[in-house]
Amino acid sequence: MNLPDATRMILAESAAFPELLRVTRDAYDDLVAGRPVHHATLSWMVREASRKGLYGVLIQKHGAAVFDDMITVLCREIDRQAPVPSR
């Protein structure tokens, strides 16, 4: 799974949540156009999808393995971009 596909999975289930829909649609459009999406935006999407109960819907619709792939792709990109705190 790639980053646009993972984002599209959240986008497809976010119609009932206008702010999540807007942010996810913008992120998806940027990714498809080859533009980067900031890690803070991706983190917000992952948190908000969880808060809105979309994880259960995504697992039921796509299965646990596909859901795990989606979360892994998003979290790896967040981790790749996020600044490393100095000690």
Image: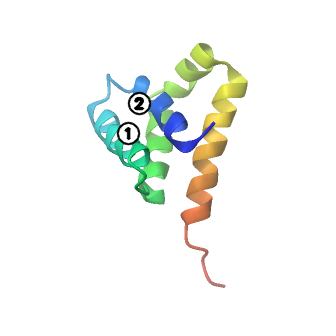
Q: Nearer the viewer, residue 51 or 11?
A: 11
Sequence-wise, the earlier of marks 2 and 1 is: 2
Please identify the residue farthest to the front as the structure is shown: 33
Q: Position of residue 8 (x, y in %)?
A: 46, 32
Badge 1 local density, few (<14 within 10 Å), some, or many (20+)? Answer: many
Residue flagged by tag 1: what amino acid is it? Thr
Q: Residue at x 61, y 62 (%)?
A: 80
Q: Position of residue 6 (x, y in %)?
A: 54, 36
Q: Nearer the viewer, residue 57 or 7?
A: 7
Image color mode = rainbow
Residue under numbered circle 2: 11
Residues at discs 2 and 1 in contact (Cβ within 8 Å):
yes
Q: Nearer the viewer, residue 87 or 76?
A: 76
Q: Position of residue 52 (x, y in %)?
A: 43, 30
Q: Position of residue 87 (x, y in %)?
A: 66, 85
Q: Residue at x 67, y 35 (%)?
A: 69
Image position of 62 with respect to 20: above or below: above
SS class of the residue under badge 2? helix
Residue under numbered circle 1: 24
